[in-house]
Image (spheres, rainbow, N blue to C red):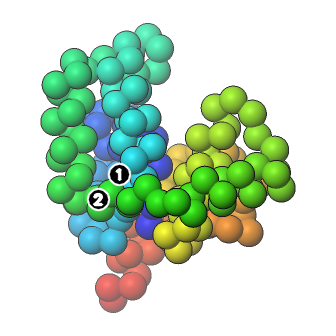
Amino acid sequence: MLVDTCVLLEASNRARGQHRAARELIERHDGLVFPAQVAREFLVAATRPPANNGLGLALLEALESLAGFREHIRLLPEEKPLLPTLLGLLAQSPAMGKRIHDVHIVAAAMVHRVPLVVTLNEDDFKDFSAHVTCLTPAQSVTQITKKRV
């Protein structure tokens, strides 16, 4: 399962609605991955002020949080096929501005053959449902629990 930035943010803030499910997913599931883009996006959002939908962390705190996530989530390598895959997806379903970040996540999932994306922003990926399936952290925990039984 590829973890989206919003899941890391959710896991970092006890006041968020899916904090518990996000923490449980990250701490209990071995097969989680994320591309470097998610790490960069986390650092941006984590150091942004809360008034601007950030966590308001100092850079050192954000780096420590990211290091903690990396103990549980494998970083996907940035590979040469990623750019052509991204450009191909953009040609099929044009995106603009910040949406290109979401298309990059889909491209990373495709290149690394990761069919599931854990996110709180399923609508951001609806144009790419032929390539990835989205689950919330709570849905992911439920799916993992069912597989173990």
In the image, is residue 21 above or below residue 52?
below
Q: Tag 1: Cα neighbours inside 10 Å, few (<14), some, or many (≥20)?
A: many
* Amino acid found under the numbered disc labelled 2: Ile
* Quadrant of residue 67 within the rendered picture: top left
The answer to whether any part of residue 21 appears in the image is no
**Residue to which mark 1 is pinned:** 22
> Residue 131 vs residue 147: left or right?
right
Location of residue 60 in the rendering, given as x and y in whole percent from the top left corner: 16, 25
Q: Residue at x 49, y 69 (%)?
A: 112
Q: Residue at x 55, y 52 (%)?
A: 105
Q: Residue at x 17, y 27 (%)?
A: 61
In the image, is residue 95 above or below residue 32?
above
> Residue 31 vs residue 62: left or right?
right
**Residue to which mark 2 is pinned:** 73
Instruction: Compare residues 66 and 138 and report the one nearer the observer.
Output: 66
> Residue 147 vs residue 82: left or right?
left
Q: Secondary structure at mark 1?
A: helix
Instruction: Compare residues 145 and 128 and report the one nearer the observer.
Output: 128
Report the Cα–Cα distance between label 2 and label 1.
12 Å
* Amino acid found under the numbered disc labelled 1: Ala
Location of residue 53 in the rendering, given as x and y in whole percent from the top left corner: 46, 21
